[in-house]
Image (tube, rainbow, N blue to C red):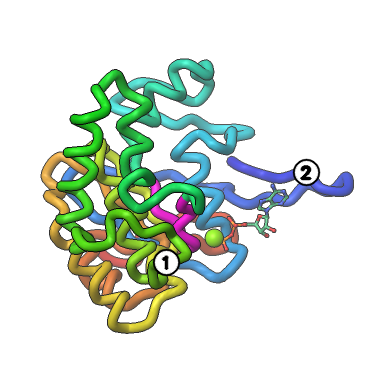
């Protein structure tokens, strides 16, 4: 269960979110604005703490793990947001290098890996561009490269095509399709019917409950 307290009122957001996300599958989560979709992703990434209930990762209860363990857990998680959230003072390449610089990898290797990842998303010739020198679709591709560069097991995407036109939505869709999902769990909050189509499971959050619409 997840609720927010505001002005002495308790807002119950998620009340019955019983679900097991499995490896090898793409999940699409739909629901009205304000339904609690972002909150659910924040609970999965441990950005938000549950008031009640538990969250497990590989059979381990991670509901109340400490800061250091949270950092370790997040090494397995890649995030993609609607607004890209790139660092505006870093180039595309540097943005993608950031997650690698947090490991003990040497800088040359970080740069090589980040370059390869940017090539994979079709941005070889945009590496030294700053976010403001990139289109929205390109910025999202950089964000995807950054999310994937450490080969995370869990990929969380919060309306990744929400700001994009149809052509760029297609580009992003292709990138998602390219991810080798065998050992990954991909959870995408989305309104895109195209993304829903490639999902193995579609879930809806409604009145705090998480329901399976199709699988
Ligand atoms: N930190 C917060 N404090 C109080 N209320 C919040 C907070 N974060 C989100 N909410 C409320 O929780 C509800 C769900 O938000 P959110 O998960 O962002 O919805 P969605 O992503 O489905 O549009 C909204 O009604 C929002 O106002
Ligand atoms: Mg949201």
Q: Name the image quarter holding the C terminus.
A: bottom left
Magenta stretch encompasses residue 80: yes
Residue at x-position 24% and y-position 72%: 171
Q: Residue 2: x and y, percent? A: 61, 42
Q: Is residue 183 above or below residue 69?
A: below
The answer as to whether callout 1 falls within 8 Å of ligand 2 is: no
The residue that mark 2 highlights is 5
For the residue pair 188 and 165, the one nearer the viewer reads as: 165
Q: Quadrant of ligand 2?
A: bottom right
| Main SS category, magenta section | loop
Q: Is residue 189 visible?
A: yes
Q: CA distance from mark 2 to mark 1?
A: 40 Å
Name the mark on residue 133: 1
Q: Is residue 118 above or below residue 8?
A: below
Left or right relative to 92: residue 83 = right
The answer as to whether callout 2 falls within 8 Å of ligand 1 is: yes
Residue at x-position 39% and y-position 53%: 80
Residue at x-position 39% and y-position 47%: 79
Residue sitting farthest toward the right? 8
Q: Residue 96: x and y, percent? A: 32, 45
> Which residues fall within the magenta stretch?
79-86
Q: Is residue 203 visible?
A: no
Q: Name the image quarter holding the N terminus.
A: top right
Magenta stretch encompasses residue 107: no
Q: What kind of element bears circle 1?
A: helix
How many C-alpha atoms fall within 10 Å of the one at disc 2: few (<14), some, or many (≥20)? few
Q: Is residue 142 above or below residue 70?
A: below
For the residue pair 202 and 125, the one nearer the viewer reads as: 125
The picture quadrant where one finds residue 140 is bottom left
Residue sitting farthest toward the front? 128
């Amino acid at each position: 269960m997840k609720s927010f307290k505001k002005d002495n009122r308790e807002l119950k957001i998620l009340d019955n979110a019983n679900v097991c996300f499995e490896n090898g599958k793409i999940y699409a989560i739909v629901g009205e604005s304000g339904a609690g979709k972002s909150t659910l992703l924040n609970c999965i990434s441990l950005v938000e703490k549950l008031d009640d209930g538990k969250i497990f990762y590989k059979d381990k209860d991670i509901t109340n793990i400490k800061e250091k363990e949270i950092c370790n857990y997040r090494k397995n998680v890649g995030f993609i947001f609607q607004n890209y959230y790139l660092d505006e003072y870093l180039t595309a390449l540097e943005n993608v290098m950031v997650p690698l610089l947090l490991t003990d990898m040497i800088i040359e290797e970080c740069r090589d890996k980040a370059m390869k990842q940017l090539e994979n998303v079709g941005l070889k010739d945009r590496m030294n561009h700053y976010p403001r020198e990139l289109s929205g679709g390109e910025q999202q591709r950089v964000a995807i490269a950054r999310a994937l560069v450490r080969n995370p097991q869990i990929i969380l995407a919060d309306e990744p095509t929400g700001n994009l036109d149809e052509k760029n939505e297609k580009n992003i869709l292709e990138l998602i399709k390219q991810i080798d999902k065998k050992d990954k769990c991909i959870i995408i909050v989305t309104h895109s019917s195209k993304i829903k189509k490639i999902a193995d499971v579609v879930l809806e959050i409604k009145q705090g409950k998480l329901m399976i619409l199709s699988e």
